[in-house]
Image (cartoon, rainbow, N blue to C red):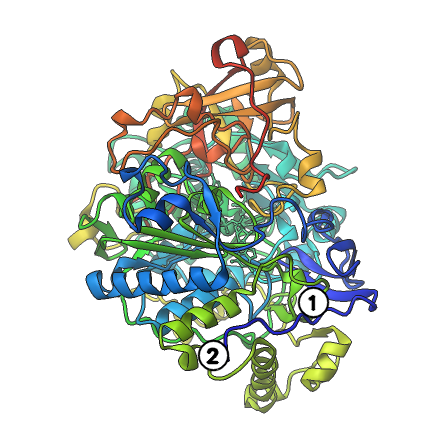
């Protein structure tokens, strides 16, 4: 291998190509350079509207045409960026040749490893990248860095960080509730009352990490309501719930962040009304007497009754008592979207969901119990295939340091500091080189003004991306990647199991390269080329990964008896010719059924083998933010309510996946004068003299951004909704000082106004608690005002999607 790209495989005379993204499977029509049209896979009953963002995405002007380097880094060498006036996020870029770039990059890797050691490389590279088992950017960068001697990695996700750490302590691993979730068929058939915290937002269920086939959520919700099922949705946004002509849907809209109080009051009401299932609690849980004491106020003098919760949730007491009663009228299911744990004390919301289901005593009965993630992703509710999908081996990482994703800025700014995490502690390494491929921290991280200061600190920042995202604009080395449409690959999903052959539909754009080819060329220069490639080209790898998987799943004894809907997996060439292969799935069963039937034969993975309604306390477990039982604590953010009285919901966008294809037609059509829409209740708008379509300034003490007002009476008053994903676009960013001292960097300076509407200039990077150290980006307190050009100057047009060089 020389590291030169394989010849492009697209054959423009073929009119249509199978392709796949995180939001669906489809065929594309191409003119050889770009996608011209997309047709959803015929097996998809409800294709995602996000498909509309794809045409035109390959040659969009925001593509990075060739390798680029920040002038300050190229001329002065590596170092914290504020040492120079041309720092990260400010300086201009030079186009350089691939060879020059890779030579300098190899030198820099050698310097950092020799001087500081591999742990000084931060190679977490969190992010979704694109679908594709081989060209998956995360797998590629991790394989490269592990082969190079390792790098500091992250642990947990922005999606379900609190669930991943905390759920195994109280009931079961997070994957059991996502992949092993109760299937739709069980809910549609058996559930009578469904309490859905965070609603069941169909907008989210278009997507699935790695790809997806059918989209059953909308159909299942309709079938459930047609059967006469009751859906009680708890969310600040009515849009998180379906409409149904015959009713059946109740909307409860508490103040954001108050769900734990709501849930504890439901437990209390069941308890005092004699509806708690004591038999279940005694047989299947530990600690319920202690929790009963807490609910009754014996522990802290506060009775957790409906009236107590009502004044925290800002809803009528009767709405809580009625809900408690409804839950006793039939088979009850309690679910929460992941948003409930993407906020401070998110662990307690999870625990309260499990506790409520335990008080109802229906866990493991058909259609009963609890679940997480229905309405968050397509995966929950779909039956899964019993075996894993093919994937690129990443090899062991010799560096063992792991830092929770949500501590990114904190880690960069406070090397050597120690934080509590899970059952131990973590000491932050001193990071000198940050390497990212397939993620966009200026999309995903909270408090972007702090992130800018944090990213000023390392010596070198390297970013691979197809597009000039804000992260690329804060990098020293910018590596132009291809998009999935330019590559052969294959992908799959475990739930709703499908394997899809992806066919390159266009030529590679300009001077971009597949990440694999970039890493191969770099690996060659660093003397690890053979270990990285194992002598295979990308085409050979894809074939190898498929054939190795085929061998495994057809010879495995457990898999042999499974029914393959399309027949057993064919040869690689036939698979590519067919395009799509449906995989066998396990029978549809309610989660935790086996445990309920035989709790000693199938114990839970918790210390007691049962559901923990209390947890032991010793060591770091005695920290004040780690209560003994599900506990209500008011979020610190509520302290801002007087000065910043609006709850801003920074949820997932309906018009794109995260920041991906923000320039696409569907995303662009939603913008107001080019800015991200902010939904505001007419009462709140009137109080501020804001009309529909006005440009508004959204602010708190962490930052400010512009957005376009949409008056909307389907949200709770005092709640505004600015979804994530608008590319960060500071008006004229000021130079960023190195360090955590914000006194020399004013986030509210006119120059630091994000003119596009990225809510992460407002969110806090405080973590859920010391248990999971997970993100709290879901909502934040803000104020909104009409944009005043007399004070702030004429609003500058959005330039986020223009190339930086
Ligand atoms: N306030 C707030 N913030 C949030 C959230 C929230 O609810 N509120 N949600 C959080 C959640 S759950 C998540 S998962 C994160 C998502 O955060 P990310 O996953 O970081 O967001 P994406 O926009 O998907 O970023 C993927 C990047 O990969 C690039 N890319 C695509 N294909 C390739 C490829 O083949 N190679 C390379 N090198 N790059 C590629 C894309 O262009 C894009 O820039 O955001 C989190 N941030
Ligand atoms: N279209 C689209 N779909 C996506 C994504 C995307 O970017 N675009 N991203 C995918 C990813 S990576 C993930 S992790 C999932 C995330 O899935 P979720 O975390 O479930 O998604 P969100 O849309 O952020 O939140 C769901 C709803 O919770 C409500 N909510 C917010 N705060 C509160 C609260 O305090 N209490 C209650 N009761 N409700 C609240 C909000 O109104 C919000 O619409 O979405 C996935 N699906
Ligand atoms: Mo996520």
Structural crowding at the residue carrying mark 2, measured as other residues with C-alpha within 10 Å and reported as few (<14), some (14–19) or many (≥20): many
Work out whether 683 lies above or below 701: above
Q: Residue at x 64, y 14 (%)?
A: 691
Per the model, the C-alpha gap separating discs 2 and 1 is 21 Å
Q: List the residue tagged with mark 1.
A: 504
Q: Is mark 2 within 8 Å of ligand 1?
A: no
> How many marks can you see?
2
Q: Which mark is residue 631?
A: none
- In-front residue for pair 400/621: 400
| Residue 24 x/y as whole percent | 68, 58
Say whether marks 2 and 1 touch (CB < 8 Å): no
Residue 152 visible in the shown view: yes
Q: Is residue 708 above or below residue 789?
A: below
Drawn side of residue 429 relative to residue 556, left or right:
left
**Residue 521 % position (x, y):** 46, 71
Please state which of residues 376 and 751 is positioned toward the viewer in this rendering. Answer: 751
Residue carrying label 2: 533
Q: Residue at x 71, y 83 (%)?
A: 573
Task: Provide the secondary structure element on which disc 1 rests.
Answer: loop
Disc 1 packing (10 Å; few <14; some 14–19; many ≥20): many
Q: Circle 2 — which element?
A: helix
The reply to whether residue 360 is in sight is no
Which residue is located at x 60 percent, y 62 percent?
A: 131
Quadrant where ligand 2 appears: top right
Front position in the image: 258 or 265: 258
Residue 422 lies in quadrant:
bottom left
User: Residue furthest toward the left?
Assistant: 619
Q: Position of residue 548 (x, y in %)?
A: 56, 85
């Amino acid at each position: 291998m020389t590291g030169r790209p394989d010849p492009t495989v697209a054959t423009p005379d073929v009119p249509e190509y199978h392709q796949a993204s995180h939001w669906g499977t489809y065929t594309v029509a191409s003119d050889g350079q770009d996608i011209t049209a997309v047709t959803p896979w015929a097996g998809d009953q409800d294709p995602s509207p996000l498909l509309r963002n794809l045409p035109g995405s390959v040659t969009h002007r925001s593509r990075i045409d060739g390798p680029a380097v920040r002038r300050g880094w190229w001329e002065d060498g590596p170092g914290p960026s504020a040492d120079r006036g041309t720092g990260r996020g400010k300086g201009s870029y030079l186009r350089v040749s691939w060879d020059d770039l890779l030579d300098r990059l190899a030198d820099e890797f050698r310097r950092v490893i020799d001087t500081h050691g591999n742990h000084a490389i931060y190679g977490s590279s969190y992010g979704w990248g694109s679908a594709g088992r081989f060209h998956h950017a995360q797998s590629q960068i991790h394989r490269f860095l592990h082969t190079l001697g390792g790098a500091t990695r992250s642990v947990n996700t922005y999606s379900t960080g609190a669930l991943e750490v905390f759920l195994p302590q109280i009931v079961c691993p997070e994957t059991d509730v996502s992949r092993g979730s109760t299937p739709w068929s069980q809910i549609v058939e058996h559930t009578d009352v469904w309490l859905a915290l965070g609603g069941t937002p169909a907008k989210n269920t278009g997507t699935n990490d790695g790809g997806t086939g059918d989209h059953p959520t909308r159909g299942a919700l309709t079938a459930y309501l047609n059967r006469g099922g009751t859906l009680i949705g708890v969310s600040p946004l009515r849009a998180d719930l379906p409409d149904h002509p015959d009713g059946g849907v109740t909307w409860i809209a508490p103040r954001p962040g108050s769900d734990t109080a709501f849930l504890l009051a439901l437990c209390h009401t069941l308890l005092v009304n004699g509806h708690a299932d004591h038999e279940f609690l005694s047989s299947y849980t530990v600690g319920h007497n202690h929790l009963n004491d807490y609910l009754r106020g014996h522990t802290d003098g506060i009775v957790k009754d409906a009236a107590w919760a009502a004044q925290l949730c800002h809803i009528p007491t009767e709405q809580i008592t009625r809900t408690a009663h409804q839950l006793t009228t039939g088979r009850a299911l309690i679910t929460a979207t992941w948003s409930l744990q993407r906020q401070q004390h998110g662990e307690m919301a999870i625990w309260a969901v499990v506790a409520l289901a335990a008080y109802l005593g229906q866990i493991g009965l058909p259609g009963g119990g609890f679940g997480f993630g229905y309405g968050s992703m397509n995966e929950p509710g779909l039956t899964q295939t019993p075996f894993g999908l093919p994937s690129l081996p990443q090899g062991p990482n010799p560096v063992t340091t792991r830092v929770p994703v949500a501590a990114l800025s904190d880690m960069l700014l406070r090397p050597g500091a120690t934080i509590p995490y899970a059952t131990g502690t973590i000491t932050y390494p001193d990071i000198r080189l940050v390497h990212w491929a397939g993620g966009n921290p200026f999309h995903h991280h909270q408090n972007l003004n702090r992130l800018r200061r944090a990213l000023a600190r390392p010596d070198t920042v390297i970013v691979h991306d197809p597009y000039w995202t804000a992260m690329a604009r804060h990098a020293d080395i910018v590596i132009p990647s291809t998009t999935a449409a330019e590559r052969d690959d294959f992908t799959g999903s475990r739930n709703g199991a499908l394997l899809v052959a992806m066919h390159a539909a266009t030529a590679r754009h300009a001077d971009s390269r597949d990440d694999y080819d970039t890493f191969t060329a770099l690996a060659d220069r660093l003397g690890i080329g053979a270990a990285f490639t194992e002598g295979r080209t990308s085409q050979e790898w894809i074939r190898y990964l498929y054939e190795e998987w085929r061998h495994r799943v057809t010879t495995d004894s457990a898999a042999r008896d499974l029914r393959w809907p399309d027949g057993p997996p064919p040869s690689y060439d036939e698979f590519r010719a067919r395009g799509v292969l449906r995989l066998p799935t396990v029978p549809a069963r309610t989660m935790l059924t086996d445990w309920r039937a035989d709790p000693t034969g199938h114990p839970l993975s918790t210390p007691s083998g049962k559901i923990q309604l209390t947890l032991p306390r010793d060591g770091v477990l005695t920290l004040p933010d780690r209560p003994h039982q599900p506990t209500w604590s008011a979020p610190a953010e509520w302290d801002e309510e007087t000065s910043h009285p609006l709850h801003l919901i920074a949820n997932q966008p309906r018009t794109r996946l995260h920041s991906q294809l923000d320039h696409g037609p569907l995303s662009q059509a939603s913008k107001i004068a080019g800015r991200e829409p902010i939904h505001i209740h007419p009462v709140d708008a009137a109080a501020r003299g804001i009309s529909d379509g006005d440009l508004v300034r959204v602010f708190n003490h962490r930052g400010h951004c512009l957005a376009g007002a949409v008056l909307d009476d389907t949200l709770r008053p005092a709640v505004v909704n600015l979804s994530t994903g608008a590319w960060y676009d500071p008006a004229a960013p000021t130079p960023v000082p190195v360090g955590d001292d914000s006194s020399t960097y004013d986030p509210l300076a006119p120059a630091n106004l994000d003119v596009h509407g990225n809510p992460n200039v407002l969110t806090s990077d405080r973590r859920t608690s010391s248990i999971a150290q997970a993100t709290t980006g879901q909502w934040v307190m803000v104020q909104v005002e009409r944009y005043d050009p007399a004070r702030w100057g004429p609003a500058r047009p959005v330039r986020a999607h223009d190339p930086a060089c």
